[in-house]
């Protein structure tokens, strides 16, 4: 008795697609696929199956989603005030004054704590070397003056208290 011949199992047919991308994008895909030991096709299919890249490209976001929404709402409010003809000048002046006060307090604290080199480096990264020296020099005498005032003992009054 002869055994019935088994037929070959039909292979699952694969679909072929074409993807267009810039050379720089393909280089990124190749690099990621090579790092994982996969072909480009297997790497791309894996991305689709997982729902996206396993690691976030670029720097981490400074604000979470709620903070981003809050900031966007504030910007929209300011824009609406300006577009509706409302006088936004006082609001802008107030923001500028608050920022200037915070900046001055930060600089004074850095200079007063003897962190002049860090202050200069931070300023130089934003303003450039020459302007940073000028700004840092304008704060240094104020910090030195504050130290002298704190170190100077005040004379006592006739009742043993300090003169005010």
Image: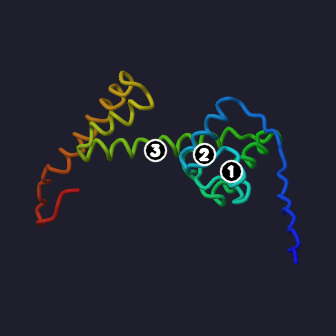
Choose mark 1 or mark 3, whichever is in front: 1
Gap in Å between the C-alphas at discs 1 and 3? 56 Å
Q: Quadrant for the C terminus, please.
A: bottom left
Secondary structure at badge 3 equals helix
The residue at which mark 3 appears reads as: 101
Is label 1 in contact with label 2 (beta carbons under 8 Å)?
A: yes
Secondary structure at badge 2 equals helix
Sequence-wise first label, 1 or 3: 1
Say whether residue 116 is left or right of residue 19.
Answer: left
- In the rendered image, the residue lying farthest to the bottom is 1
The image quadrant of residue 129 is top left
- The front one of 21 and 82 is 21
Sequence-wise first label, 1 or 2: 2
The residue at which mark 1 appears reads as: 42
In the rendered image, residue 92, in percent from the top left (x then y), is placed at: 64, 40
What residue is shown at x 23% (from left), y 40% (from top)? Answer: 145
- The front one of 25 and 37 is 37
Q: Quadrant for the N terminus, please.
A: bottom right
What residue is shown at x 11% (from left), y 59% (from top)? Answer: 156
Sequence-wise first label, 3 or 2: 2
- In the rendered image, the residue lying farthest to the front is 1
The residue at which mark 2 appears reads as: 33
Q: Residues within 10 Å of mark 1 (few under 14, many from 20)?
A: few
Is label 1 in contact with label 3 (beta carbons under 8 Å)?
A: no
Gap in Å between the C-alphas at discs 3 and 2? 51 Å
Is the residue 117 above or below the residue 53 in the image?
above
């Amino acid at each position: 008795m002869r055994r019935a011949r088994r037929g070959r199992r039909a292979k699952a047919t694969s679909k072929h697609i074409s993807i267009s991308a810039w050379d720089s994008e393909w280089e990124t895909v190749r690099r990621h696929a090579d790092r994982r030991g996969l072909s480009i096709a297997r790497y791309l299919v894996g991305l689709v199956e997982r729902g996206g890249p396993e690691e976030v490209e670029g720097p981490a976001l400074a604000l979470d989603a709620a903070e981003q929404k809050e900031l966007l709402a504030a910007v929209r409010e300011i824009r609406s005030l300006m577009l509706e003809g409302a006088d936004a000048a006082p609001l802008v002046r107030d923001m500028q004054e608050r920022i200037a006060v915070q900046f001055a307090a930060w600089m004074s604290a850095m200079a007063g704590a003897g962190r002049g080199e860090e202050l200069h480096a931070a300023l130089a990264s934003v303003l450039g070397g020459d302007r940073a020296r000028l700004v840092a020099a304008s704060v240094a005498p104020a910090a030195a003056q504050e130290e002298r005032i704190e170190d100077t003992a005040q004379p006592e009054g006739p009742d043993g208290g300090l003169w005010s």
